[in-house]
Image: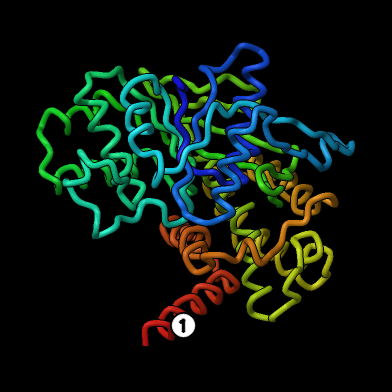
């Protein structure tokens, strides 16, 4: 096993986005190589998923939706996975791989993926046991790579965190200082590791057991250009740019905010437990509220930033994506970690409008944020 790409996370999103991209690029001889996937959670489902990743015939990704006005229904058999490993069972093998053949590390560890675990400590640097938190896992692997004198590595966090590469680097560096690791390694974290800020965008609505996913045709991976970076692959839906922020802003303020606002209405009015985004978009009152939110509380912010045209063009795509008749995107799934998502997706729009001194009352956004504060207070009381 000598994969050049090491991936933390087995989510249906990664299966239908990064892994599918690499699979398609391999067919064109445009990828570094195949992927070793690391499962970090313990459950019977995760064990079945790892076993499926190790099957030679791959797993299915079904692309369903509308593209350029025409229906799209495709099925790909993704065979880009070299091996599926479990951090709790295969840590020595993961450490060896990370210290030798790996050139790229990809992650998507969820909304709380950068949180630390108090039980992780420097004794784990030489242990056969994996740390609990993802940043500590990464620190141990990079330290072993440093000790072995391995080549530089490029890291592509795909978590929905602004400046995700910079944020993850800061977390890992702070942890390295807390563990009192030597100064040479601290330098290596900046000079031997290339931390990429990136943005991923694709709606992956359903999992296929034990591995596989159903996704929309639209997909993009926007990567902030850096010197010495190594791409996992080249692909038509990968964009390398010097300016990541406009892409991030459009996705966060229009698509992600729209999803979270629909989830807020679903929770507040206790709508049907299996309601989908399509069903919500088909409800006249809900659709009208979302359209008013975009038009009155969000788009004026883009106007003030001189980004009106690309924002409205992207919003037209978002409407089509939310009304995709082929995807069963449940609001219950979107509502997971809801208060944290509101903090990340709604609050920045209000804060930016204030910073730009725009005369926007933004009543819907502010009402949702007040409810978030009330729920938090009730939970801590």
- In the displayed orientation, state which residue is furthest to the right: 70
- Please give the name of the residue rendered at 21% of the width and 27% of the height, measured from the top-left corner: 188
Q: Nearer the viewer, residue 133 or 94?
A: 94
In which quadrant is the C terminus drawn? bottom left
- Please give the name of the residue rendered at 68% of the width and 42% of the height, measured from the top-left corner: 212
Can see residue 359?
no
Secondary structure beneath label 1: helix
Is the residue 114 above or below the residue 340 in the image?
A: above
Structural crowding at the residue carrying mark 1, measured as other residues with C-alpha within 10 Å and reported as few (<14), some (14–19) or many (≥20)? few
- Residue 169 is situated, as x and y percent measured from the top left of the image, at 30, 39
Is the residue 78 above or below the residue 320 in the image?
A: above
Can see residue 13?
yes
Quadrant of the rendered image containing residue 220: top right
Q: Position of 24 compared to 283: left or right?
A: left
Q: Which residue is mark 1?
A: 374
- Please give the name of the residue rendered at 75% of the width and 70% of the height, measured from the top-left corner: 286
Q: Nearer the viewer, residue 302 or 46?
A: 46
- Please give the name of the residue rendered at 70% of the width and 29% of the height, measured from the top-left corner: 57
Q: Position of 36 compared to 380: left or right?
A: right
Is the residue 191 above or below the residue 216 in the image?
A: above
- Residue 1 is situated, as x and y percent measured from the top left of the image, at 46, 22
């Amino acid at each position: 096993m000598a994969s050049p790409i090491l991936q933390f996370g087995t989510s249906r999103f990664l299966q239908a986005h990064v892994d599918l991209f690499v699979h398609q690029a391999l067919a064109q001889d445009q990828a570094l190589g195949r992927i070793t996937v690391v499962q970090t959670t313990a459950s019977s489902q995760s064990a079945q998923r790892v076993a499926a990743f190790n099957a030679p015939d791959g797993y299915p990704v079904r692309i369903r939706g509308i593209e350029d006005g025409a229906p799209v229904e495709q099925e790909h058999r993704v065979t880009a996975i070299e091996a599926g490993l479990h951090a709790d069972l295969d840590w020595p093998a993961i450490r060896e791989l990370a210290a030798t053949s790996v050139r790229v590390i990809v992650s998507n560890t969820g909304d709380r993926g950068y949180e630390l675990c108090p039980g992780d400590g420097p004794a784990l640097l030489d242990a056969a046991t994996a740390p609990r938190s993802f940043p500590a896992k990464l620190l141990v692997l990079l330290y072993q790579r440093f000790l072995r004198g391995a080549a530089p590595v490029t890291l592509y966090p795909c978590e929905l965190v602004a400046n995700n590469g910079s944020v993850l680097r800061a977390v890992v560096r702070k942890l390295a200082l807390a563990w009192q690791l030597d100064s040479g390694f601290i330098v290596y974290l900046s000079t031997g590791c290339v931390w990429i800020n990136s943005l991923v965008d694709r709606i992956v609505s359903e999992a296929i057991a034990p591995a596989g996913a159903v996704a929309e045709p639209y997909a993009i991976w926007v990567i902030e250009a850096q010197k010495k970076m190594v791409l996992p692959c080249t692909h038509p839906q990968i964009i390398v740019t010097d300016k990541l922020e406009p892409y991030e802003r459009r996705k966060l303020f229009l698509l992600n905010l729209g999803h979270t606002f629909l989830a807020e209405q679903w929770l507040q009015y206790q709508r049907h437990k299996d309601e989908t985004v399509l069903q919500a978009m088909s409800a006249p009152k809900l659709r009208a509220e979302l359209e008013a939110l975009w038009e009155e509380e969000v788009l004026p912010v883009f106007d003030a930033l001189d980004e009106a045209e690309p924002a409205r063009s992207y919003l037209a795509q978002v409407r089509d994506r939310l009304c995709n008749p082929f995807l069963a995107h449940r609001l219950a799934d979107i509502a997971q970690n809801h208060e944290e998502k509101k903090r990340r997706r709604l609050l920045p729009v209000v804060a930016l409008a204030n910073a730009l001194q725009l005369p926007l009352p933004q009543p819907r956004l502010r009402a949702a944020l007040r409810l978030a504060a009330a729920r938090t207070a009730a939970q801590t009381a």
